[in-house]
Image: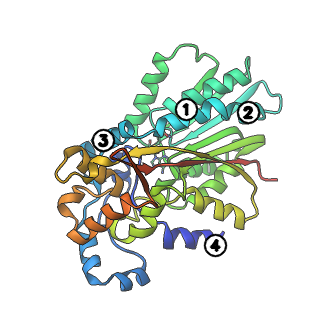
Amino acid sequence: MLGFSAHITRNNISAPLFLHLEQQFHYHSGLHVCKPKNESHIAVLGSRFVAMASSLRSLVHDDSRYQKSFQLFLECSSEHQCMRDFINNILPDILASIGDGKSHLNVIGVGSGAGEIDLEMLSKLHLQHPGVTVDNEVVEPSSQQLLNYKVLVSRTPDLEYINFTFNKMTASEFEEDLKRKKMIKKADFIHMIQMLYYVKDPEATVSFFQSLLDKNGKLLIILVSGESGWGKLWRTYRSELCNTEISQCVTTGDIKSFLDSSGIRYQNYTLPSQMDITECFSEGDEKGELLLDFLTEVLDFSKTASPELKAGVLELLRHPDCSVESNGKVIFNNNLEVIVLNQLT
Ligand code: SAH
């Protein structure tokens, strides 16, 4: 356990990704400066990089630019498609094994966003357990996302079997809330998809939600894979690019090390995914600059990063460790990984 915390703190500090970050910004307001935390790394890099790092602003400071770059990321990547493939091809078998014959199932979605992926999973759950009613708790701190989720529910037919409870809170607020109310909440299916970057202690969060699992329950986690281009980028440039107070640069590699060291068994599946980053290499290209902001999580990266940092990041992004080049395109490795946990025995 301790080993994992230390690992997260030392090695996996980085920028937030894939999300609508205005809410994060509010939760952590006051902690806006990107400061390298790793002392030995600082010594190696020298003062030039340290000074530069603190002058870079996080993309979260400009929500409209964040949203634009996030949308562009979705258009240029197979992020959502690879999740859908998993939901269609693999998830049904996982869901079939939950519930232990009960007529009512409890589901918790943590960091559900606008709920598109949640509803797709719930529909697979329904197919596997027809006639079973579902209590679906949504834990999502962004009011905008909760609103989007509610609108989606209101527009989606045939959801009568589900009772939705919307909790406008973070994962840790949800935990505190349960503890304060001394409630014993047991769940058959819990998911946290692309959200563990935004909790202070990913290890503790996983452990807490795993402790809520009922008999045959499953906890599903999706994050970028440690082997993805993101993993490589984060391992190389975390000190320069990251705001450790806002997010953890955690990959499934880190979660798996923690689980392995704690002797916790899990299943895992890699979801191959790609992102076309070709435009990042055309100086002055608007799309390229937005994508670079998303990749580095730095606001106006091209204009504000030092020439050395910019050159280093661009070189790494097209390096075979991160991308493949074919037909004039640079395709970044955006692989995700799913981890599935059972109830602790
Ligand atoms: N699961 C969705 C959304 C992922 S984006 C999907 O894959 O499509 C990450 C989501 O986590 C955002 O909606 C964000 O508001 C939410 N989030 C951020 N910090 C959180 C926290 N501490 N606890 C729970 N959710 C959080």
Mark 3 crowd level (few <14, some 14–19, many ≥20, 10 Å Cα): some
Label 2 near label 3: C-beta < 8 Å?
Answer: no
Distance (Cα) linking label 4 and label 2? 34 Å
136 relative to 221, above or below: above
- Point out which mark residue 2 bears: 4
**What's the distance in space between the residues labelled 1 and 2, CA to CA?**
15 Å
- The residue tagged with tag 2: helix, strand or loop? helix
C-alpha separation, residue under disc 3 versus residue under disc 4: 36 Å
Q: CA distance from mark 1 to mark 3?
A: 22 Å
Q: Is residue 338 left or right of residue 21?
A: right
In the picture of the structure, the residue carrying the numbered disc 2 is 93
Up the image or down, 195 lies above or below 51; here it is above
Amino acid type, label 2: Asp
Sort mark 1 into few (<14), some (14-19) or many (20+) by Cα contacts within 10 Å: some
Sequence-wise first label, 3 or 4: 4
Colouring: rainbow
Mark 4 vs 2, N-terminal side:
4
Front-most of residues 269 and 15: 269
Is residue 31 visible in this depiction of the protein? no
Query: Looking at the image, is mark 3 or mark 4 nearer the viewer?
Result: 3
Residue at numbered disc 1? 84
Q: Quadrant of residue 33?
A: bottom left
In terms of sequence position, does the residue under pointer 3 or pointer 2 come before the other? 3
If you read the primary sequence from the N terminus, does the residue marked by circle 4 or circle 1 appear first? Answer: 4
Residue 192 position in % (x across, y down): 57, 45
- Residue 235 in percent (x, y) is at 46, 67
In the image, residue 248 lies at what x, y percent?
47, 61
Label 4 vs label 1, nearer the camera: 1
